[in-house]
Image (tube, helix red, strand yellow):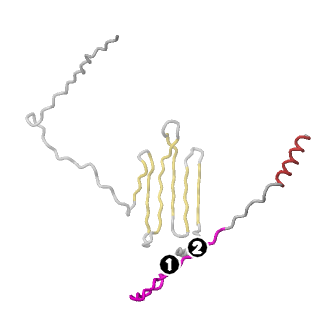
Amino acid sequence: MKLFIVAAVLAVAAADRLPAPRSYSVPAPPSYSAPAQPSYSALAQPSYPAPAQPSYSAPAAPKYSPKVIEILSQEFDLRDDQSYDSSFQTENGIYASESGQAVAGYGDEQSYAVQGQYSYTGDDGVSYTVTYVVDANGFQPQGDHLPTPVPTEYPTPEVPATQASYQAAPAPSYQAAPAPQYQPTYQ
């Protein structure tokens, strides 16, 4: 313990003898001026003022306050069999409802079969409604404003198959690749 006290006293004494830390001051920015115009007595040149320094500033932040939309109703019901019903409605006309039932998923995972709808008023003042189903085939929305996919399978015309027009191709025959003939020799 005495050794610890002696070491602490020596450390304080040594710290007292250290030179004072140097202070650092920020250098003044250099000043710039236009170079002096040489004067020629034989040939007079016009003098032009130095160009003005451009000034840059960030654009002003937009001045708006977001309107807080009130939720008029909200319900969520989770039943013992893990099925649920959910809905909400806001003051600006957004409405959504959804119901889901637990189904077998992948492996030990549980999944849901879901059906629902939502509606809102667009910027053009038209009310849009989307109904959807979510199941093993993925998310399948339907709505009058949604584009419909182009069919990818077109019906093929019936063509009569006759013996003369159709002959089965012979089945390909495969042969095993020959074994290599290289034989290493060891010395």
- Quadrant the C terminus occupies: top left
Asked which secondary structure carries label 1, the reply is: loop
The answer to whether 124 appears left or right of 67 in the picture is: left
- Residue 91, quarter of picture: bottom right
Q: In the image, what residue type sits under mark 2?
A: Pro
Front residue of this view, candidates 119 and 1: 1
Q: In the image, what residue type sits under mark 1?
A: Pro
Give the residues in magenta: 26-51
Q: Residue 40 in magenta?
A: yes
Please name the residue that numbered disc 1 is placed on. 54
Between circles 2 and 1, the one closer to the viewer is: 2
First along the sequence among labels 2 and 1? 2
- Assign the magenta stretch its main secondary structure: loop
Residue, x 52% and y 41% (percent of image)?
110
Residue 170 image point, x, y percent:
16, 28
Q: Residue 145 carries which label?
A: none
Please name the residue that numbered disc 2 is placed on. 30
Residue 150 image point, x, y percent:
29, 55
Asked which secondary structure carries label 2, the reply is: loop
The answer to whether 176 appears left or right of 28 in the picture is: left
Residue 48 image point, x, y percent:
44, 86
